[in-house]
Image (cartoon, grey):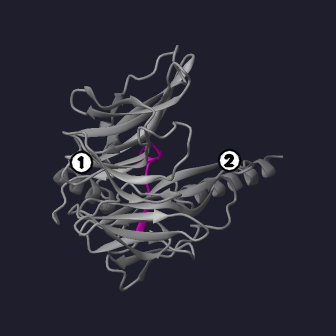
Amino acid sequence: MKKYTVLLSTLLLIVIVYELIYQGKVFKISKNDIFYNELLQLGKNNVWKMLMLRTERIEPFYKEIFEISSFDIRNIKKIDINLYTPKEWPSKNLVAYALSPGGKEIVFAISERDGAFNLVYSLYILNIMDGNIRIILSPQQSTEITKVCYFPDEKNIFFVGKVKKPKEAPNISQPDSLYKLNLKTKEITELIHYGVFTITSQSSSPNGKKIVYQKSSNLDKIFIYDLTTNESSKLTDGNYASWRPDGLKISYYGQDGNYYLINADGSEKELFILNKPIHKFKLIGAKIGYISGELLWSPEGQYVYYERTSIKAFADVETYLPYIMKVSSKEERKLSNMLSGIKNWVGENKYK
């Protein structure tokens, strides 16, 4: 009996070591970890800020909390947007949000039902320092907002949605467009008119002169819109497009499942990341799969953040684990799960 106990304990120890080392669950933080300390130093020099969203349960309802963090997860700043009460939840929903390039504000859109149970949308700006919120667009039926993003000048934002004309009936469906909104004058200008869409959080070029966007159909197509000429041109087939901080290249998810870099004029396509699972076989624990979604570039372009799919043993529920890759060496590390769900990464961009 004792012999079997020792054998079982040995096997269990082997499995634990396998999980910690081979699966790469632990992102070691020590004085000798050059990779992590380089991130901390760069983050300190560039005042990196990352925006995440968390849902917290407050009996008997849930509420959304914005989190502002860097790689030093001891300094996570939580911001309650104070839009929910037990009486009105879940009538209000947070549908879109984005961090300003300077890291001082968050723009976010809310959908809710009015007295006649019509769906209305509103837009707000949250000051991260003091928590104050100012309204940009009051609740209205004429405007629908599904995605938002700042222009680099922070004086304008653009959003995907609908802006119905006064004579149009509220219940008549119309294609979604891309609009520019001046935050001071609140003037809305339609830039691109199109149907089914997807647009990434880094859609504006670093100099604010171009926008990369995607048309989704049977074959996803990525386009470039030039704000100086008001013209669009097809860039390539694919999705999840995002600008490299120098503005010269765009990363995107190709039709074969890998990630590519391409010049903004559509030339010199090159393989960037060969997208494959970290390990196809696991003894126990989660299976770490493919990269999912867009690549999020660090402000100086040395790193990319992304998430990998993860399926736990004996469960069909898919979750997402945060990873970071050093561009020069293609070295990849898993981050703390506390850094999952990052949507914006801002800081000093020397290329502007």
Residue sitting farthest toward the top: 87
Q: Secondary structure at mark 1?
A: strand
Image quarter of residue 172: top right
Q: Residue furthest right?
A: 1
Q: Is residue 312 magenta?
A: no
Q: Which residue is mark 2?
A: 317
Q: How many marks?
A: 2
The dot on residue 156 is 1
Residue type at mark 2 is Val
Q: Nearer the viewer, mark 1 or mark 2?
A: 1
The three-letter amino acid code for the residue at tag 1 is Asn
Residue 199 in picture, x, y percent from top left = 43, 57
Asked if residue 194 is positioned above or below residue 142 in the image, the reply reads below
**What is the spatial separation of the Cα atoms under label 1 and label 2, in whole angstroms?**
39 Å
- In this view, the residue in front, 58 or 122, is 122
Label 1 crowd (10 A; few <14 / some 14-19 / many >=20): some
Would you say residue 336 sits in the magenta stretch? Answer: yes
Q: Which residues are magenta?
A: 331-342
Identify the residue shown where x is 49% and y is 64%. 215
Horizontal arrangement in the rendering, residue 89 relative to residue 352 (left or right): right
Q: Residue furthest bottom?
A: 268
Q: Is residue 285 left or right of residue 117?
A: right
**Position of the C terminus by quadrant:** bottom left
Instruction: Give whichever of discs 1 and 2 has the lower sequence position.
Output: 1
Question: x and y percent of residue 324 in the render?
Answer: 40, 60
